Amino acid sequence: MLKKFKNIHKGKRGFLVACGPSLSKTDVSKLNNEITFVVSRGYKRKNLNITYLFIGDMHIYKQFYDEISKVKCSALFVSKGIYFSGLPLNKNTYYFTGHGKKKFHKDVTKNIYGGGTSTFLAMQFAYYMGIQELYAIGLDHSWNFSKTLKIGRGSGGNLMRNLTQDGNHFSKDFYGKNVTWFYPKVDKMAESYKMASEAYTKDNRILSNASLETKLPNSIMSRTDYNTIYKI
């Protein structure tokens, strides 16, 4: 099913919309005519144009299924486990298979590496679709776990539950009180971003962090001023 997306946007640019706090300060109206790769509950950002949505966490999908099922986008990409979970799916839902070799996968039709974040999944899909320039926004790479509680372990890692409102994303109710989610492995995520950046650079493509605020080092991913992209 995924083969139909091969080079569908060859040579074009796209925007990867992550969900860090800085997204609330970002003028997303500039993306109205752009190709966007939105992850997790990024659909909660008002006035955001969503081309593709990526959900890799079964717990999030189940808890917010009613919302996710109503998101308007060209395609929703979910993990194989979500796809075959028995929950009803929209006709534009496609699945990817994780647990692939630890590397940046240029062919998403095979087992691919999750990299600890749906953001890395989106980077691989954007590459497969032929995106020449991919700019990330909301990729703040900053986390505070003081208001979470470890409640056990799932198939994808340690499970957390928020004790109060969310302070790690652009909305306080992104993962609100009592929401269960996977504990982010920050080092693993940074390692994945570096692999993605190297893959894009090697093939003369651009992968750059255009977030208004970020703690992701420039040595892992180059930086671009979001507001200058539209002056090029």
Image (tube, rainbow, N blue to C red):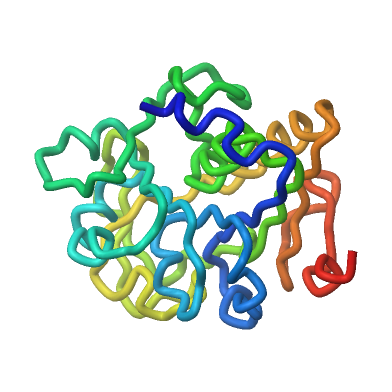
Pick the quarter of the image with the N terminus. top left
Residue plotted at (80% across, 43% down): 206
Pick the quarter of the image with the C terminus. bottom right
Q: Where does residue 163 sit, x and y in percent of width and height?
A: 30, 73
Q: Where does residue 119 sit, x and y in percent of width and height?
A: 54, 48
Could you say which is closer to the camera, residue 162 or residue 169?
169
Q: Where does residue 113 sit, x and y in percent of width and height?
A: 50, 27
Q: In this view, does 6 lie above or below 22?
A: above
Residue plotted at (38% across, 30% down): 96
Quadrant of the rendered image containing residue 2? top left
* One can see residue 174 in this view: yes
Q: Is residue 149 above or below residue 151?
A: below
Left or right of 77, for residue 154: left
* One can see residue 188 in this view: no
Could you say which is closer to the camera, residue 165 or residue 192?
192
Q: Is residue 105 above or below residue 174?
A: above
> How many tags in the picture?
0
Q: Where does residue 82 sit, x and y in percent of width and height?
A: 24, 39
Residue plotted at (68% across, 36% down): 10
Quadrant of the rendered image containing residue 106? top right
Left or right of 105, for residue 93: left
Could you say which is closer to the camera, residue 13 or residue 189?
13
Quadrant of the rendered image containing residue 111? top left
Left or right of 17, for residue 63: left
